[in-house]
């Protein structure tokens, strides 16, 4: 009997030490950049351990696939916020995400005396799960001494759960979170200005209400501002799928900017910047007076500003033109005038897949328009001339077809001869001639 009790004690003690070892290993792997001089509790590491010990929906940024029997309900919920609300609600508010930074970014160290920040998040009738996941990701993946507060600016929301229920919830969080209520709908810029005026931090960080920060997102941004307080910095913007909530890493070889039509586009990093950085992709990309951080990864839209920038956007464009049959998108492939338009896997990151369907019934990419001068194509990109003719396409929102008026043919998926170029064929109503113009807005 005594030997049995002795064995139980030994086994229990061994099990306890094994669990302690596991927690410590995961803590140091999760916080490999933690500063020993700072107060870093074990709580974030424990959260990471808990989220990684099961295969829950969306963990590690994996796509959430809705069963066929739930598809109709999913489509109805999609209309509420224009994303897959059913998938979002299935995902934990503190889900895990992969660390996709370059190896050189993971080992970088930053000064001890970085400025702290106030995060401003504007929302209007935002979904509960996406708003709270944004807040939790910012808290869980920001060093505590750098995150002073979070300000939520409610731009006249009407949903009950964004009132007292939200106030009660944020009161339980470990970081001070305040809500400012706009008296009437004022728009994103005015709401952000209201939030900025109420901040107490040394730096103001603006987050969308439906994004998720990943490990190491904040320190590089604050380090650039410490070097030059006049800097306007923007991180690499990764993507969360609006349909599956899959996390997809962005490219460090592109930077964001506006073309002369004030459409936001992604552009390749110019050679002069590659030369200046001498091949070190962890260094920031400079564009005029703006500085883009080397590799703080996060999802969806996040912009951090230490100064102010005011822009009036007069037109918006679709993010993609997606073929129903192949689930691939029209893509300009970075090609120039007089070259064929391309066809590529939809990536949801804008860039070469950003097109505008205009009031003149043109399909534009920057100052180039899709053009076809004869039956069966080819479809090329030429300077927009606003005279319709070969550049006129009529979109039927019910049949999902793009009719090239001059040839009376429909835009179709590529042929076997050239699988990377859309073509024109006699209209037949088949799926290969159906196109979904996501977020398409007429521009004037």
Image (cartoon, helix red, strand yellow):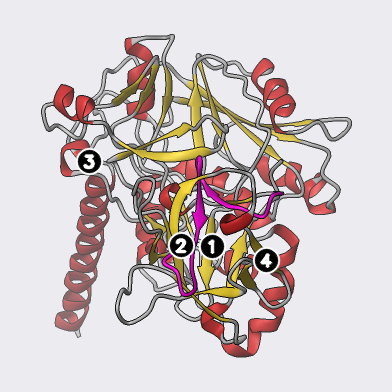
Asked if the residue at tag 3 contacts the one at tag 2, i.e. Cβ–Cβ closer than 8 Å, the answer is no
Up-down relation of residue 8 to residue 224 (above or below) = below
Which residue is located at x 69 percent, y 47 percent? 169
| Residue 69 pos. (x, y %) | 63, 90
Can you say which quadrant of the picture contains the C terminus? top right
Q: SS at mark 2?
A: strand
Q: Which mark is residue 130?
A: none
The tag earlier along the polypeptide, 3 or 1, is 3
Q: Which mark is residue 321?
A: 1
Asked if the residue at tag 1 contacts the one at tag 2, i.e. Cβ–Cβ closer than 8 Å, the answer is yes
Q: Nearer the viewer, residue 156 or 301?
A: 301
Q: Which residue is the site of mark 3?
A: 32
Q: Which mark is residue 395?
A: 4
The image quadrant that residue 71 belongs to is bottom right
Up-down relation of residue 435 to residue 129 (above or below) = below
Q: Which residue is the site of mark 2?
A: 330
Q: SS at mark 1?
A: strand
Can you say which quadrant of the picture contains the N terminus? bottom left
Q: Nearer the viewer, residue 85 or 395?
A: 395
The tag earlier along the polypeptide, 4 or 2, is 2
* Magenta stretch, residue numbers: 359-379
Which residue is located at x 50 percent, y 77 percent? 65
| Residue 386 pos. (x, y %) | 63, 44
The tag earlier along the polypeptide, 3 or 4, is 3
């Amino acid at each position: 009997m005594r030997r049995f009790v002795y064995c139980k004690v030994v086994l229990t003690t061994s099990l306890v030490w094994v669990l302690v070892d596991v927690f410590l290993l995961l803590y140091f792997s999760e916080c490999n950049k933690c500063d020993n001089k700072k107060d870093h509790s074990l709580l974030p590491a424990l959260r990471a351990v808990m989220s990684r010990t099961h295969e829950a929906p969306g963990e590690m940024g994996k796509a959430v696939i809705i069963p066929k029997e739930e598809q109709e309900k999913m489509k109805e919920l999609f209309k509420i916020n224009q994303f897959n609300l059913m998938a979002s609600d299935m995902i934990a508010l503190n889900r895990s995400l992969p660390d996709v930074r370059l190896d050189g970014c993971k080992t970088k160290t930053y000064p001890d005396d970085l400025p702290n920040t106030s995060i401003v998040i504007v929302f209007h009738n935002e979904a509960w799960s996406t708003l709270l996941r944004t807040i939790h990701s910012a808290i869980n993946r920001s060093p505590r001494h750098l995150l002073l507060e979070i300000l939520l600016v409610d731009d006249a929301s009407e949903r009950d759960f964004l009132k007292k229920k939200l106030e009660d919830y944020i009161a339980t969080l470990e970081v001070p979170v305040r809500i400012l209520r706009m008296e009437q709908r004022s728009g994103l810029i005015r709401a952000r200005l209201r939030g900025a005026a109420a901040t107490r931090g040394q730096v103001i960080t603006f987050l969308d209400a439906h994004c998720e920060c990943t490990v190491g997102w904040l320190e590089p941004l604050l380090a650039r501002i410490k070097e030059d307080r006049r800097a306007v910095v923007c991180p690499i913007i990764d993507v969360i799928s609006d349909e599956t909530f899959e996390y997809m890493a962005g490219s460090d070889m592109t930077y964001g900017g506006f073309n002369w039509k004030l459409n936001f586009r992604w552009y390749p990093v110019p050679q002069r910047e590659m030369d200046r950085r001498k091949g070190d992709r962890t260094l920031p990309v400079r564009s005029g007076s703006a500085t883009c951080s080397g590799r703080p990864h996060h999802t969806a839209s996040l912009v951090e500003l230490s100064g102010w920038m005011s822009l009036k956007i007069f037109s918006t464009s679709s993010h993609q033109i997606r073929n129903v049959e192949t689930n691939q998108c029209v893509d300009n492939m970075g090609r120039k005038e007089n070259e064929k338009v391309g066809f590529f896997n939809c990536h949801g990151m804008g860039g070469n897949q950003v097109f505008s369907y205009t009031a003149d019934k043109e399909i534009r990419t920057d100052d180039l328009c899709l053009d076809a001068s004869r039956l069966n194509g080819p479809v090329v990109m030429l300077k927009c001339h606003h005279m319709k003719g070969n550049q006129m396409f009529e979109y039927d929102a019910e049949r999902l077809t793009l009719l090239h008026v001059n040839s009376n043919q429909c835009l179709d998926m590529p042929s076997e001869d050239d699988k990377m170029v859309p073509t024109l064929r006699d209209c037949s109503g088949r799926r290969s001639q159906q196109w979904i113009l996501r977020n398409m807005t007429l521009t004037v």
